[in-house]
């Protein structure tokens, strides 16, 4: 954890809502960095880790209490295509956690006294493919094959001792099962967050069934949705809270859509912090933003949740 006196995130959720950060990629792009390759923001773990620290710090200054690491697209396979060996990749995964910790230390030096936490991002298999398939799922792999893919990265991130593992942007229940197996017994809590369309996962499974997979998983401290349209959040929160009895995590994107072929966003932004009250009332306890939600959006969430 980024502060020596910070309570566990799980205990904080029992006391009230906690503000997550926003999209790290859009913050890095706003700072002038080109993320137009297969490694996306993870490339800067190799080439510009100081920029990653700066992006995390900006969100802490905006009111976030949780920094999600730049490891979403960081995998042994993806970095391996750039010629990096397993030891170097494990070091970069650890660096993603340390970069968020360093941002927390700098936030402390600036006088930010509230508890701060680090969530190690574990993106889906489709993120490694960099073809937009994390918005479809159904990769043609078995649960066991997906578990073998995720386990080395999950273990490397857990070894860096983040406060929580963020199993995020999960498009289908097969991958959720694989991730739940991969985190079992590691001694690090996790949240499980699906990317959804309406009342179903991106692969088309009912959210009630998807959330139920985590209901009895002791490692999972929150379930919910991310990288989805803001309009899809409220019903998903209600379902997650009812099915699992756990705190709910929500961090939708701006409302725009990702065009994988053009590698660009289109449509209009519909994110509005006025929705936060409804999310909290439905059971959301971790609230932030995903792609294209920047520091101003996170500041508005922090204000809506009472600072």
Image (tube, grey):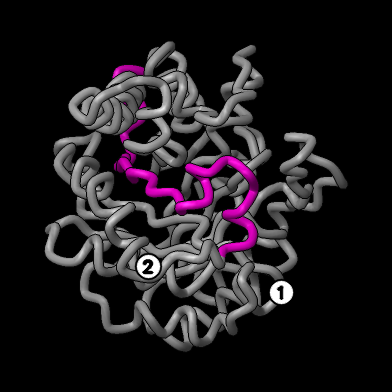
The residue carrying mark 2 is 222
Image vertical order of residue 83 relative to residue 222, above or below: above
Q: Relative to residue 242, is residue 154 drawn left or right?
A: left
How packed mark 1 is, by other alpha carbons closer than 10 Å (few <14, some 14-19, many 20 or more), is some
Q: Secondary structure at mark 1?
A: loop
Image vertical order of residue 4 relative to residue 155, above or below: above
Residue 203 percent coordinates (x, y):
61, 71
Q: Give the residue at x 45% y 28%.
A: 42
**Quadrant of res 67:** top left
Image vertical order of residue 58 relative to residue 142, above or below: above
The residue carrying mark 1 is 198
Is residue 14 at least partly visible in the picture?
A: no
Residue 245 percent coordinates (x, y):
38, 83
**Quadrant of res 3:** top left
Considering every residue shown, the one lying at the far right of the view is 267
Is residue 69 at least partly visible in the picture?
A: yes
Residue 152 percent coordinates (x, y):
23, 47
How packed mark 2 is, by other alpha carbons closer than 10 Å (few <14, some 14-19, many 20 or more), is many
Q: Earlier in the sequence, mark 1 or mark 2?
A: 1
Quadrant where the image shows the N terminus = top left
| Badge nearest the viewer, 1 or 2 | 1
Magenta stretch: includes residue 118: yes
Q: Relative to residue 134, is residue 269 drawn left or right?
A: right
- Span shown in magenta: 108-137
Q: Give the residue at x 23% y 59%.
A: 189
Q: Relative to residue 159, is residue 173 drawn left or right?
A: right
Q: Give the residue at x 65% y 34%.
A: 296
Residue 20 percent coordinates (x, y):
47, 47
Q: Secondary structure at mark 2?
A: strand
């Amino acid at each position: 954890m980024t502060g020596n006196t910070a309570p566990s995130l799980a205990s904080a959720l029992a006391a009230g809502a906690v503000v997550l950060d926003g999209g790290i990629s859009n913050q890095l792009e706003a700072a002038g960095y080109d993320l137009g390759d297969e490694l996306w923001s993870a490339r800067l773990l190799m080439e510009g880790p100081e920029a990653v620290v700066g992006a995390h710090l900006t969100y802490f200054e905006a009111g976030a209490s949780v920094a999600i690491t730049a490891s979403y697209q960081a995998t042994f396979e993806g970095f391996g295509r750039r010629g990096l060996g397993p030891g170097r990749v494990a070091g970069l995964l650890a660096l993603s956690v340390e970069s968020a910790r360093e941002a927390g230390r700098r936030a402390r030096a600036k006088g930010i006294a509230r508890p701060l936490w680090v969530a190690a991002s574990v993106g889906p298999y489709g993120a490694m493919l960099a073809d937009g398939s994390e918005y479809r799922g159904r990769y043609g792999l078995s649960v066991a094959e997906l578990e073998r893919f995720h386990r080395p990265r999950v273990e490397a991130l857990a070894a860096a001792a983040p406060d929580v593992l963020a199993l995020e942007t999960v498009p289908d229940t097969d991958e959720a099962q694989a991730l739940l197996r991969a985190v079992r017994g590691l001694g690090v809590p996790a949240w499980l967050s699906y990317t959804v369309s309406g009342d179903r996962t991106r692969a088309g499974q009912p959210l009630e069934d998807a959330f139920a997979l985590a209901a009895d998983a002791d490692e999972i401290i929150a379930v919910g949705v991310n990288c989805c349209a803001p309009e899809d959040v409220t019903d998903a929160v209600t379902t997650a809270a009812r099915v699992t009895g756990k705190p709910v995590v929500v961090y939708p994107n701006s409302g725009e859509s990702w065009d994988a072929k053009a590698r660009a966003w289109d449509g209009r932004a519909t994110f509005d912090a006025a929705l936060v009250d409804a999310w909290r009332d439905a059971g959301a306890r971790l609230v932030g933003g995903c792609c294209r939600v920047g520091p101003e959006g996170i500041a508005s969430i922090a204000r809506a949740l009472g600072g």
